[in-house]
Amino acid sequence: MLMFHPAIARGGIKVELPRPILVFRVRDAWDFEKMKVPLRDGDQLTGHSRQGADIAIEGQIGQHSGSLKVSEPEMFAVLETLRDALSVNATVGTFSLVVFADDSSPDHRYFKACTTTKFEFDLSNQHLYSFSAMIHAADPHLYSGLLPE
């Protein structure tokens, strides 16, 4: 059964996002050309095409990979793992963002061709660290099936 199970997947390695996830917001947008015809009410739109999807994720580091993380060193280690997984540069390419997964089968729902545009974390509460990530999926489709290698 598919369940909300967000993770970063790259090169056969899957890094689960820490829980709880407080916000998982996907924003789609479309390009188009807008023209105003003289002496005619309204405007005309042509050339609709979908842009990539922007995904905003906010969460807290209370649990990771099914185990509770309660000490500051444990929470910071999870934060470093997440930060590395979200990193994109010339040697480490794009990643897939898993949204739903089925633990009993290889079926997933995911975005591919993802890059991180912003990552923030807050260490001011020693009992519960929080994080925020902005991810851009160049391909806006939500794919189904096996994760790409």
Image (cartoon, rainbow, N blue to C red):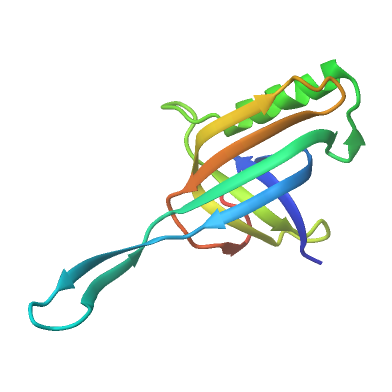
Q: Nearer the viewer, residue 50 or 105?
A: 50
Can see residue 4? yes
| Rendering coords of residue 13 (x, y %) | 67, 38
Query: Is the residue 81 above or below the residue 60 in the image?
Result: above
133 displayed left or right of 42: right
Q: Nearer the viewer, residue 45 or 141?
A: 45
Q: Nearer the viewer, residue 39 or 89?
A: 39
74 displayed left or right of 139: right
Q: Residue at x 85, y 34 (%)?
A: 62
Can see residue 15? no
Direction left: furthest residue = 38
Query: Is the residue 83 above or below the residue 102 in the image?
Result: above
Query: Is the residue 138 above or below the residue 68 in the image?
Result: below
Q: Residue at x 66, y 51 (%)?
A: 24
| Rendering coords of residue 97 (x, y %) | 60, 48
Query: Is the residue 32 above or below the residue 139 in the image?
Result: below
Q: Nearer the viewer, residue 106 or 125?
A: 125
84 displayed left or right of 124: left
Q: Residue at x 24, y 71 (%)?
A: 47
Q: Quadrant of residue 130?
A: top right
What quarter of the picture does the N terminus occupy? bottom right
Q: Residue at x 21, y 77 (%)?
A: 44
Q: Quadrant of residue 12?
A: top right
| Rendering coords of residue 80 (x, y %) | 69, 22
| Rendering coords of residue 77 (x, y %) | 77, 21
